Image: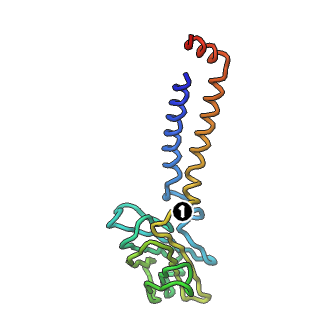
Amino acid sequence: MVKQAIRASVTAFIIATALYANVAGAHGNVAIEQDSCMRRAGSSMVHLSVYQPKIEPKAHYCTDIPHEGETFLVVDLVDAALRDMPVSMRIVKGTDEENGETIKIVKPIYHPDGVVAESVFLEKGRYTVMIKGDGVPPVEYEYPLRVQMINYSEVFKKAIGPTIAFLVLIFIGYKITKTKKVQKWLASKRS
C-alpha cells in the first residue's frame, strides 16, 4: 500500500510538472501590457524579438537567450509616431553604456515600415540593447539581455508549483497510510 501511495504521488508529480511547465513557458498570446518584450516611454511603445535561426529556427526570445551565436534583433516600432522620427539602436556588451563595450551601432534613420532589424554575434554574458527615437522630446528604451545564462528566479518560479503539489501529495499519502483501515490491512499482510 505504501509503495502504491508513493507511485501515485510520483505519477501525480510528473503530470503536474508537465502541465505547469507548458503553461509557464508560453510567451505568445499575452496582453500587450503583460508582454515582457514590450517597452513604454511616455505614450510610445516598442517591442523586441530575438531570433537565432541557425540554432532554433522557430523559437523567439526577449531578454533571456539560451545560446550564444548569430542573433537577429528585431524591434517593432508599435506607435506610428516613432516611424516619423529617426530611430537608432546600440548594442552594448555589459549593463550600461559607460561601463560596457559597444559591439554594434545602427545610426538614426527613419523606419517607415516600423521595423529596426540587426544581426549580431552574441557571446555568453550580459548585454544591453538601447533604442533611441530622436524626436522632441527624445524617447529611449533599454532591454537587458542575458545570453546563455541561468535565470535562477525563473527556475524558482517554474519549480515552486510542482514542488508544492509534490509535498501535498506526500502529505496526503502519509495521512492515508496512518488511517486505521490501512494500519489493519498492513498488519494483516505482515502476519
In this figure, which colouring scheme has been used for the structure? rainbow
Instruction: Give x and y (percent) for residue 30.
Output: 54, 58
Residue at figure coordinates x 37%, y 68% from the top left: 52
Q: Is residue 144 above or below residue 98?
A: above
Q: Is residue 187 above or below residue 69?
A: above
Q: Kindly give the residue lying farthest to the front in the view shown.
A: 191
- In the displayed structure image, the side of residue 34 where residue 75 appears, left or right: left
- In the displayed structure image, the side of residue 191 where residue 148 appears, left or right: left
Instruction: Give x and y (percent) for residue 102.
Output: 47, 86
In front: 108, or 3?
Answer: 3
Q: Which residue is mark 1?
A: 151
Local SS, label 1: loop
Q: Is residue 57 above or below residue 131?
A: above
Instruction: Give x and y (percent) for residue 139.
Output: 59, 83
The quarter of the picture where the C terminus appears is top right
The 10 Å Cα crowd at callout 1, few under 14, some 14 to 19, many 20 or more, is few
In front: 136, or 34?
Answer: 34
Q: How many marks?
A: 1
Q: Amino acid at mark 1?
A: Asn
Residue 72 picture quarter: bottom left
Residue 142 picture quarter: bottom right
Instruction: Give x and y (percent) for residue 131.
Output: 52, 81
In front: 156, or 57?
Answer: 156
Residue 135 picture quarter: bottom right
The quarter of the picture where the N terminus appears is top right
Residue at figure coordinates x 43%, y 74% from the top left: 74
Residue at figure coordinates x 39%, y 78% from the top left: 120
Q: Kindly give the residue lying farthest to the left in the view shown.
A: 54
